[in-house]
């Protein structure tokens, strides 16, 4: 088939995919301890209540939601001789490094809420600029429908490997038996990010270029909101990602309570997480192949159905049974990476579809919206999960009855199952497939040829061969 031949011609080298994906490792190595280790660490060194620390992080998350679209638009509109994305990635590095040092390795003996809030705001600005620019760059590396899944799949592998590496550090530190275990553990993770980030960014920006894309025009904010609200494919992806953030956030926020209190496997929690992430790494190629065979949106639906079917296995894990728990978490990990990288790949197609309809290039804005919906979902997940635990009478640092522990399993499983099947139903009839994407790319490529030809006429006064003989762009489907 001609389209298949075109896809093969557009294939990126493995070395390019490897180099591009490298910054994702420190990105993930930063994100995991921010969610798991930093809140209790600051609760101890500041003496603040854990609830108050949780409120601070919730406020920071919502602040991040407002800054994401702004930084996404900046990433779209301002470019240099390097292109549109790489200079923003490089600019984010010193911001992230400094704020990681101040948060993970605080140079003062006494720090308070204002210190934490201030440096977390700085960190999230740098981190958002880094992640949005990196995802947008990946979306623009190739116009190919299936190749975009390879790009985001490579990035997802790097993300998971970063998580695995940073999860291993506390285990190593604990064996060294330092005098202040909490400080040593957090500092090790901070130094890991500080050292790794500039190296990975240097390699990626040095050896991977950017494809030339149309320069975006300035559009009034109200017009942007109006156009986005009418974009059905965008709405579907954002709704599914929001639901995924809620489901994933609930499972993540309740994981420690489930493993330690209900399953009585506190010593196994780190191993369960490692097995979960490693299973995810090994299964990414399978999900890429499946997306090529059935389409990205249907592969996403299958992934959601898989979650909805397997999460109830939690009900059947006997208390204290390490082997069955390990097997279950390996199974859970089979599709843990599928949704995130498929949504990012689909969003690149949505950005192309929008560009066909609007004539604008808003990839950075679209990816900022994608990061925002997941953050909103995760923020609400913490509130929902902890609220339901309170209603059930769960005590975090005390004894709980068997009835309460059974309710914890129920709270862990049922919302995740409902969300998973809701995502599968919503994404199943997603309107953009490989055929639509190929048609959209032909329109965009012809527009680029016409724009180049027009520029030649402006300079020489003579029409170019491309303009006089090339095919005219065809219309695209509506939103």
Image (cartoon, rainbow, N blue to C red):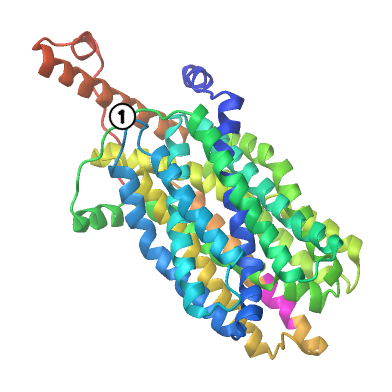
Q: Position of residue 291 (x, y in %)?
A: 58, 38
Report the residue that reaches farthest toward the left. 461
Q: Residue at x 36, y 64 (%)?
A: 66
Q: Is residue 54 above or below residue 336?
A: below
Q: Which quarter of the picture shows residue 104?
A: bottom right
Q: Is residue 371 left or right of residue 307?
A: left
- For label 1, the crowd category at 10 Å Cα-Cα, with few meaning under 14, some 14 to 19 and many 20 or more, is many
> Quick check: is 292 in the magenta stretch?
no
Q: Who is closer to the viewer here, 77 or 327?
A: 77
Q: Is residue 441 above or below residue 312?
A: above
Q: How many marks?
A: 1
Residue occupied by mark 1: 444
Q: Which quarter of the picture shows residue 8?
A: top right
Q: Position of residue 343 (x, y in %)?
A: 51, 48
Q: Which quarter of the picture shows residue 470?
A: top left
Is disc 1 placed on a helix, strand or loop?
Answer: helix
Q: Residue at x 73, y 72 (%)?
A: 256
Q: Who is closer to the viewer here, 205 or 2?
A: 205
Q: Is residue 58 visible?
A: no
Q: Who is closer to the viewer here, 193 or 75?
A: 193
Q: Residue at x 53, y 53 (%)?
A: 97
Main SS of the magenta part reads helix
> Quick check: is 412 in the magenta stretch?
yes
Q: Position of residue 473 (x, y in %)?
A: 25, 25
Q: Position of residue 46 (x, y in %)?
A: 60, 81
Report the residue that reaches farthest toward the front. 108
Q: Which residues are magenta?
A: 407-413
Q: Is residue 476 visible?
A: yes
Q: Is residue 436 above or below residue 121?
A: above
């Amino acid at each position: 088939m001609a389209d298949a031949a075109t896809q093969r011609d557009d294939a990126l080298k493995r070395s390019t995919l490897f180099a591009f994906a490298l910054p994702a490792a420190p990105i993930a190595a930063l994100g995991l301890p921010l969610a798991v280790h930093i809140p209790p660490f600051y609760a101890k060194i500041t003496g603040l209540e854990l609830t108050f620390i949780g409120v601070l992080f919730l406020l920071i998350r919502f602040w991040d939601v407002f800054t994401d679209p702004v930084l996404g638009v900046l990433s779209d509109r301002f470019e240099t001789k390097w292109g549109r994305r790489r200079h923003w990635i490089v600019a984010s590095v010193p911001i992230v490094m400094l704020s990681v040092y101040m948060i993970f390795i605080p140079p003062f003996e006494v720090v308070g809420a204002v210190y934490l809030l201030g440096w977390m705001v700085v960190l999230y600005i740098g981190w958002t600029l880094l992640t949005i620019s990196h995802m947008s760059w990946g979306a623009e590396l190739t116009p190919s429908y299936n190749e975009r899944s390879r790009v985001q799949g490579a990035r997802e592998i790097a993300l998971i490997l970063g998580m695995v590496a940073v999860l291993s550090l506390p285990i190593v530190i604990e064996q060294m038996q330092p005098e202040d275990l909490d400080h040593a553990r957090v500092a090790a993770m901070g130094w890991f990010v500080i050292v790794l980030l500039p190296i990975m960014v240097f390699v990626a920006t040095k050896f991977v270029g950017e494809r030339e894309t149309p320069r975006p025009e300035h559009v009034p904010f109200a017009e942007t909101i109006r156009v986005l609200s009418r974009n059905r494919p965008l709405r579907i992806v954002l709704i599914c990602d929001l639901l995924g953030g809620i489901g994933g956030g609930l499972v993540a926020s309740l994981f420690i309570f489930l493993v330690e209190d209900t399953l009585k496997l506190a010593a196994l929690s780190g191993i369960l997480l490692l097995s979960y992430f490693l299973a995810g790494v090994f299964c990414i190629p399978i999900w890429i192949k499946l997306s090529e065979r059935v389409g990205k949106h249907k592969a996403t639906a299958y992934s959601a159905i898989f979650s909805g079917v397997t999460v109830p296995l939690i009900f059947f894990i006997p208390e204290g049974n390490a082997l069955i728990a390990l097997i279950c978490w390996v199974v859970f990990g089979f599709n843990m990476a599928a949704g995130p990288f498929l949504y990012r790949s689909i969003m690149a197609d949505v950005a192309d579809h929008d560009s066909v309809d609007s004539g604008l290039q808003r990839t950075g804005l679209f990816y900022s919206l994608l990061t925002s919906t997941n953050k909103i979902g995760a923020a609400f997940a913490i509130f929902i999960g902890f609220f339901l635990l309170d209603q059930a009478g769960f005590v975090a640092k005390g004894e709980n009855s068997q009835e309460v522990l059974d309710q914890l399993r129920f709270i862990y499983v049922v919302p995740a199952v409902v969300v998973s099947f809701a995502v599968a139903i919503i994404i199943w009839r997603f309107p953009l497939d490989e055929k639509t994407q190929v048609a959209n790319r032909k329109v965009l490529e012809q527009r680029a040829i016409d724009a180049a030809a027009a520029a030649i006429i402006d300079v020489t006064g003579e029409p170019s061969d491309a303009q006089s003989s090339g095919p005219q762009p065809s219309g695209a489907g509506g939103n």
